[in-house]
Image (cartoon, rainbow, N blue to C red):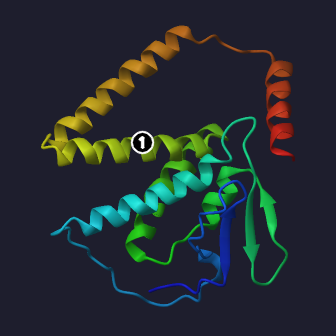
């Protein structure tokens, strides 16, 4: 089911060539739908999934970091919002193409999970997920076993986490944590 392109659109202020329309899931009327199942006989399904993941990564990528740029969210029934918070942008994106939208939902899960566990980092998660998905697709297309790739990713992430734990230090001072969170909120303009 395609959404009306006039409901909500998200356009990067720094990338005016990106004119793909997206619509807000909150604006849709609820309808009962059967599950749609897609097969990848000719590779077009995978291409569309990857296009959705790439679209979200590009949109959110501009908000990343201390010098992240703004994104405009325009609602048909209200004034546009200018935000630089990846989580806010991520919640509003829904593409018209159903297959591309599945890609959006995949990375939305990664961003939401990171945000709920760490309180921040959804944009970083989306950009990293895009990289993993895009590179994983390339090596699978070249003939590598997907199960072996997944095992390698898990093994590598476990090694990285243990190395990061060795480099980390415990923070027990409440003032330090409050100062860190305050700086984080200031950088977001809240």
Residue that extends furthest to the front in the rendered view of this protein: 17
Give the class, few, some or many, for how many residues have Cα within 10 Å of label 1's Cα (few <14, many ≥20): some
Please give left or right for residue 179 compared with residue 42 in the image. right
Quarter of the picture holding the N terminus: bottom left
Q: Which residue is drawn at 36% across and 47% down?
A: 133
> x, y (%) of residue 160?
42, 20
- The count of marks equals 1
> x, y (%) of residue 86?
66, 51
Is 37 situated above or below 91?
below
* Residue position marked by numbered label 1 in the rendering: 131
Is 39 situated above or below 168?
below
Q: In which quarter of the image is residue 80?
A: bottom right
Q: Is mark 1 on a helix, strand or loop?
A: helix
Please give left or right for residue 21 compared with residue 47 in the image. right
> x, y (%) of residue 59?
60, 56
Q: Quadrant of residue 38?
A: bottom left
Q: Which residue is drawn at 48% across and 40% down?
A: 128
Q: Nearer the viewer, residue 1 or 69?
A: 69
Q: Which residue is drawn at 36% across and 63% down?
A: 49
Please give left or right for residue 74 compared with residue 151 in the image. right
> x, y (%) of residue 165?
51, 14
Please give left or right for residue 85 compared with residue 49 in the image. right
Is 51 situated above or below 35?
above
Q: Residue at x 81, y 65 (%)?
A: 81
């Amino acid at each position: 089911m395609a959404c009306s392109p006039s409901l909500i659109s998200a356009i990067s202020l720094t990338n005016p060539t990106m004119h793909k329309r997206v619509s807000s899931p909150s604006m849709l009327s609820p309808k009962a739908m059967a599950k749609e199942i897609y097969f990848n006989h000719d590779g077009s399904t995978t291409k569309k999934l990857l296009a959705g993941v790439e679209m979200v990564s590009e949109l959110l990528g501009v908000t990343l970091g201390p010098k992240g740029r703004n994104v405009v969210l325009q609602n048909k029934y209200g004034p546009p919002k200018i935000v630089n918070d990846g989580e806010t942008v991520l919640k509003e994106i829904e593409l018209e193409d159903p297959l591309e939208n599945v890609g959006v939902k995949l990375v939305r899960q990664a961003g939401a999970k990171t945000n709920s566990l760490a309180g921040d980092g959804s944009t970083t998660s989306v950009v990293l997920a895009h990289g993993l998905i895009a590179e994983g697709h390339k090596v699978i297309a070249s003939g590598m076993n997907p199960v072996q790739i997944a095992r390698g990713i898990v093994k590598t992430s476990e090694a990285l986490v243990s190395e990061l734990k060795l480099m980390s230090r415990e923070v027990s001072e409440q003032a330090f944590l409050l100062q860190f969170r305050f700086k984080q909120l200031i950088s977001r303009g809240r």
